[in-house]
Amino acid sequence: MMESVLEVPGARLRHFVRGSGPLLVLIAGGQGDAAVNDALATHLADRYTVLTYDRRGLSGSTTDAPGPTLATHAADVSRLLSALTTEPAYVFGSSIGAMISLELTTSHPEQVGVVVAHEPPVIQLLPEPERAVAVQDLLGVEETFRAEGPLPALRRFAVFADIDPTDREPDVEMRPPGPEHLPNAEFFLTYDTPAVRTHALDLTGLKDSPARIVPGVGANSSHIWPHRCARLFAEELGLPYETFPGGHNGYRFRPRATAERLHQVLAG
C-alpha cells in the first residue's frame, strides 16, 4: 500500500493506493476516513487498484478553506483521480460518500465509468411527511451536537440510521476510537451533516450522464429513510437498484461480502 498527499485548493488530501487492475475509489460515509475502508479495500485489491482517502478536514487531510460543500468534496475526488489515471474510474460511495460520488458524476462525468451509490440520502426525493422526518433527524443531530457535544450527536445519528455493529462478519474487529475520532466527528457534524441536509442533486444531469449509475440498498435497512431515498432515486432515474449485505454501514461491517457483491455489480 502506498500513502501519498495531494495538494489541492484549500486542502491537503492524504490518500492510499493498493492492489492492481482498474481504478476503484471508495468514498466512506459519516465521519469515516480512509481507514474505515481498509478491510473492504483489502478484499478488493486482488482485482482493482483501490484508492481510499481521508476527506478534507478528517484525519490526515487538512483544510484551511471555508466549510466544504458536497461540490468541494467531489472536486477533491476529481483531482485525486486526475493524479492517478486518464481513464474513467469505478466509484463506490456510501451515505454522504454516495452523495459525493453522484456529485462527481454530474460535475466530472468523463472521470466516472461506473458509480455505485449505496443509500445516498437524497432527501429532495422524499414525499412529505417523510422528508420532514428526515430533515428533522439531521437537524436533531446538529442541535444535539451544539448542546451536548459530538458523542451524543453520533449516538443520535446511529439511532435513525440503525447502525448495528453486531451485524458484522465474525472476523471484523471494531477498532477502539483513536485520537482522530473526536476531531473527525466535530468536523463532520459542523460542516458535512448540514451540507447533506441542504444539498440538491442535479437529477437531470445524472439522467444524461454517460456513466453507468447503480443505486444500492442494504439488505437489512429497508426500515430507514436513506434506504427509501435510494429506492426513490433508482425509480427517478428509471434504473434497477442492487442489494448489498448488511445495513446502512454494511461496507464497514461486512467488507468481505460487500467486496464480492460490489465486484459482481461492477462486472455486470
Image (cartoon, grey):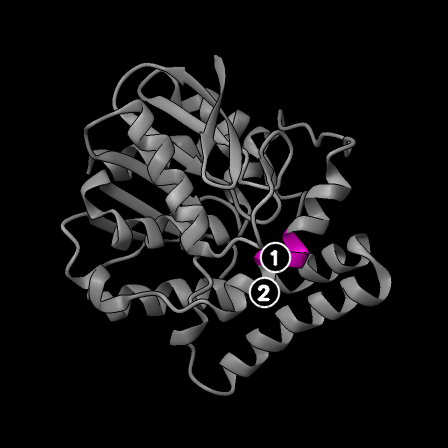
User: Left or right: 263 with respect to 62?
Assistant: left
Question: Which residue is tagged 1?
Answer: 191
User: Left or right: 66 with respect to 101?
Assistant: right
Separation of disc 2 and disc 1 at Cα?
6 Å
In the image, farthest residue toward the right: 148
Determine whether 247 is above or below 266 in the image: below
Residue 267 among those drawn in magenta: no
Question: Which residue is tagged 2?
Answer: 194
Residue 25 percent coordinates (x, y): 38, 33
Q: Secondary structure at mark 2?
A: helix
Residue 267 percent coordinates (x, y): 21, 33
Residue 110 percent coordinates (x, y): 18, 42
Determine whether 236 is above or below 254 in the image: below
Q: Which residues are magenta?
A: 188-192
In the image, farthest residue toward the bottom: 128
Q: How many marks?
A: 2
Q: Kindly report the secondary structure that dominates the magenta region of the rendered protein.
A: helix
- Asked whether residue 95 appears in the rendered view, the answer is no
Q: Secondary structure at mark 1?
A: helix
- Residue visible at 75% across and 60% down in the picture: 153
Q: Nearer the viewer, residue 166 or 161?
A: 161
Asked if disc 2 and disc 1 are in contact, CB closer than 8 Å, the reply is yes
- Name the kind of residue labelled 2 in the image: Pro
